[in-house]
Image (spheres, rainbow, N blue to C red):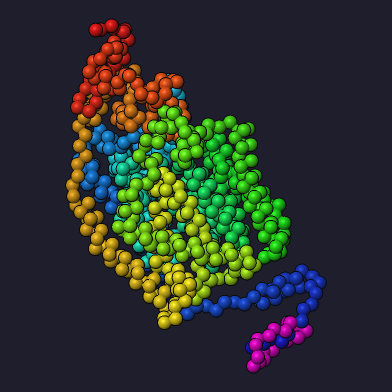
Amino acid sequence: MAEEEGDGPESNAPTVSAGPAIELRQRKKPKSSENKESAKEEKISDTPVPERAPKHVLFQRFAKIFIGCLAAVTSGMMYALYLSAYHERKFWFSNRQELEREITFQGDSAIYYSYYKDMLKAPSFERGVYELTHNNKTVSLKTINAVQQMSLYPELIASVLYQATGSNEIIEPVYFYIGIVFGLQGIYVTALFVTSWLMSGTWLAGMLTVAWFIINRVDTTRIEYSIPLRENWALPYFACQVAALTGYLKSNLNTYGERFCYLLMSASTYMFMMMWEYSHYLLFLQAISLFLLDNFSLEQSDKVHEVYKIYIFSLFLGYLLQFENSALLVSPLLSLVVVLMLVKCLQLNVKKRTFVAKIMKVINFYLVCTLTVTLNIIMKTFVPHKENGHMLKFLEVKLGLNMTKNFTMNWLLCQESLQAPSQEFFLRLTQSSLLPFYILVLIICFLSMIQVIFRRINGESLEETVTLEDGRIGERPEIIYHVIHTIFFGSLAMIIEGLKYLWTPYVCMLAAFGVCSPELWTTLFKWLRLRTVHPVLLALILSMAVPTIIGISLWKEFFPRLMTELTELQEFYDPDTVELMTWIKRQAPAAAVFAGSPQLMGAIKLCTGWMVTSLPLYNDDDLLKRNENVVCEEGDKLTYSKYGRFCHEVKINYSPYVNYFTRVYWNRSYFVYKINTVISFQS
């Protein structure tokens, strides 16, 4: 059908044509505002209106989305309930006295929960915040801003919610606290579910992600061992941010979807940065991934730079609300993002896919790397800051770039969580079939991405939309991002086992996406050049059959174990620690200060409220130095000593220790000695 226009607006006469539809239009120059409006309306009317999908198609889409969302929310809720039930069975929590419950918080977890208790005891929220920001009741002879130094924003939020919602009349503080953390873990699982669903197009991938996450929870989360850890508060927000970023990078997302993903990404990025002092390092790796994506896929350049704006906004807002935290100003994330924005403004408008454009890409990459390092050095020179220098030295020693006899460095190297991953870690992932499928999916996506890069180098243009028949999964920007993301996190996990908790959840997500994605199987079969069976048909079959077989296998092998864990009663029995804490509360002088292992000091601070000499924290140079001074003096080297260990020598009353210390309490596990105010010279 074609429309023919005459001189006036009323002269439209439809005619039927056997050829393709052609539109003939005679335009007049707009001489007034009315003519301009009419011209604008004509332009709008020229835009083709997409045909409305049939009702049954709309119903199918709605049903698919509804069932997927229901499955995602249900998975998160069930996981949170599972954690709560498992925690109750493991510690017999509801039948314990308050002191016994608090002893279950070990190490730095005890410190975090103790400040939550302090906030609830404060007469007002403002007074509680002031006491934490000017705290002189934790570490002897030192006043600290505990909120800034230990990132106590989760405890501030939890205390406000507990009192504002009237929960103090319904639930005990400890149950409210751990309930929030378990709820965040449910959100964590839901976000992983949604990410895998967005990438594969089927919520079956989300279900498989959750199954692998729970089965491998020894390697995906530390929630069972240390509930109040900062990462247990922060990583759920990071998972939400990654899910929103995945949706935002999709090429076929509509305007409303983009806005929703952008807002969710902004909120979750800021919350993630507030919850954890190390969050900007993870976002730095993410920014590098997006930078590489920008170089590989120019079509997403504008979206990537919008994400950079979110980083800058979150950094400066965090700087203001975290008591002008200078660590954020000297962070590599800020230096990188500022340079990327600057290079974007200076970028020349060069025709794409030309030799000059390729040279400009190389120059752009070089400029970003050199300027980022230069800017970061300048910022550290002129901005006063307390950087975690011991962590940089630790990485140098860990990577074999340096050697040291420093006590703190060697002490950190002895920590189990900072060792290289053990063989048991890889064995567990293999037994659940996670690692083999992850490697398969990663290889296919990586090779497909390399193909895309070489096609771009050779000047070939990429299609705006990739269909299933194309078999080019590496052209999708969200896939490119996740491949780079998982390679970075995996490299860190291969060096330090404690970082596996950042990597393994996304291993579950990527493996589940791959086996449930027809596009990935089509990509593989296109390479194999199958002729007997149509690649697309076989891919559709395998994308349903493989996850179904995996799910049945996991159900048969691991579901009985999970049910056994919930039905088996365990008991946390530590009478010696209970006796020690009871004695301190009843017998210790009010002005007493305790010294000992950092892990025990955290429990003493929580259970008794007495001051200690050090805390089990790795992010403060002064506290690490105090830990060192407990065992050796300034200038001592870690060499063989002719003297025995102090803890052993003082127990058997060897001189000269008995001249300085008097034993005031002991049981099977603990010995408490008081420093003599008047030195006695006993034989």
Q: Is residue 140 visible?
A: no
Please state, as top left, top right, bottom left or bottom right, where the N terminus lies in the image. bottom right
Nearest to the observer: residue 619 or residue 496 = 496
Dominant SS in magenta = loop
The answer to whether 565 is drawn above or below residue 145 in the figure is: below
Which residue is rendered at x = 62% and y = 61% of the image? 298
Expressed as whole percent of the image width and height from the top left, the position of residue 606 reads 32, 31
Which residue is rendered at x = 25% and y = 50% of the image? 85
Which residue is rendered at x = 37% and y = 35% of the image? 414
The answer to whether 89 is drawn above or below residue 524 in the figure is: above
Q: Is residue 616 visible?
A: yes
Look at the image and say whether residue 12 sits in the magenta stretch.
yes
Expressed as whole percent of the image width and height from the top left, the position of residue 234 reads 43, 46
Nearest to the observer: residue 422 or residue 88 = 422
The answer to whether 585 is drawn above or below residue 37 in the figure is: above
The answer to whether 27 is drawn above or below residue 671 in the figure is: below
Query: Magenta residues, as a range?
Result: 6-25
